[in-house]
Amino acid sequence: MTNGDVIASLVNCSESIISGMDAGVHTFTGNGSYVFNFTDVLGNPGSVVATVENIDKNDFDVVFSYEPQNPHSGNITVIASLTSTGGIAPVGRTASGTHQYFTVFSGVAGQDVTLTGDVTFTNYVGTTSTSGYSLRIDRKIPVCEVEYSTTGMVNTDVMAWLVNCSEAIITGSDNGTYIFT
């Protein structure tokens, strides 16, 4: 297999030949067949078919998936999968690969970080493809203030709730509110 061009030429002819317009040489830029037409010095015609099935110039893509898929405060697994694109794969090559690269990121305690990186795959004929990923891991501890319905001495219930939070807060059934009785 190759990711380059293949040059075919007429060799070992049984008679001296006068080449046609192709001069006895043909460059294959992709898989296929080519008919060499030629004549010998006495004018007798001949032909031979050259067939190439070992050129692999198909591009491939690196596709990223993340588990879990959304910004998260825990570990995130990056999965880079290699897939083929750009036409029908030649003999001996599957159109879609199952090659995968896994790595796990845990972020930095107390920080909201975006991590980036590149993954490069090289196939068996030397074609390379590089693709980048970007993921966010939020391990920053949210900060909120508490506001009260009253701060003086009372003989009734006092309600407290979260205010001025550093980011959106998901609360339970109490909706971020507590009643002191």
Image (cartoon, rainbow, N blue to C red):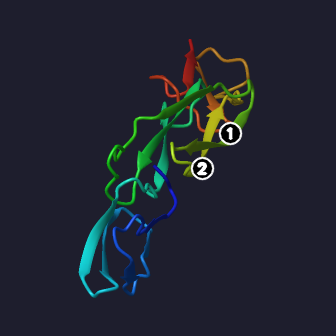
Residue at 25 percent across and 76 percent down: it is 46
Residue at 34 percent across and 43 percent down: it is 92
> Mark 2: few, some, or many residues within 10 Å (few <14, many ≥20)?
few
Q: Is residue 84 left or right of residue 149?
A: left
**Vertical placement of residue 41 versus 72, above or below:** below
Residue at 70 percent across and 27 percent down: it is 141
Task: Name, please, the residue furthest toward the top.
Answer: 181
From the image, state whether disc 1 or disc 2 is nearer to you: 2
Q: Earlier in the sequence, mark 1 or mark 2?
A: 1
Q: Looking at the image, which is closer to me, 142 or 15?
A: 15
Could you say where residue 82 lies in the image, as x and y percent from the top left?
Answer: 46, 42
Question: Circle 2 sits in a helix, a strand or a loop, which is it?
Answer: strand
> Mark 1: few, some, or many residues within 10 Å (few <14, many ≥20)?
few
Task: Give amino acid for label 1.
Answer: Leu
**Vertical placement of residue 69 versus 33, above or below:** above
Name the residue tied to disc 1: 115
Q: Looking at the image, which is closer to me, 74 or 156?
A: 74
Q: Looking at the image, which is closer to me, 42 or 100?
A: 42
Could you say where residue 47 lies in the image, as x and y percent from the top left?
Answer: 26, 74
Q: Looking at the image, which is closer to me, 153 or 83?
A: 83
**Vertical placement of residue 171 versus 33, above or below:** above
Question: Circle 1 sits in a helix, a strand or a loop, which is it?
Answer: strand
Pointer 1 with pointer 2, Cβ within 8 A: no
Q: Is residue 80 left or right of residue 144?
A: left
Q: Say the numbered circle drawn on residue 130.
A: 2
Could you say where residue 181 lies in the image, as x and y percent from the top left?
Answer: 56, 11
Q: Say the numbered circle drawn on residue 53.
A: none
Task: Give amino acid for label 2.
Answer: Thr
Q: Is residue 19 left or right of residue 155?
A: left
Q: CA distance from mark 1 to mark 2?
A: 17 Å
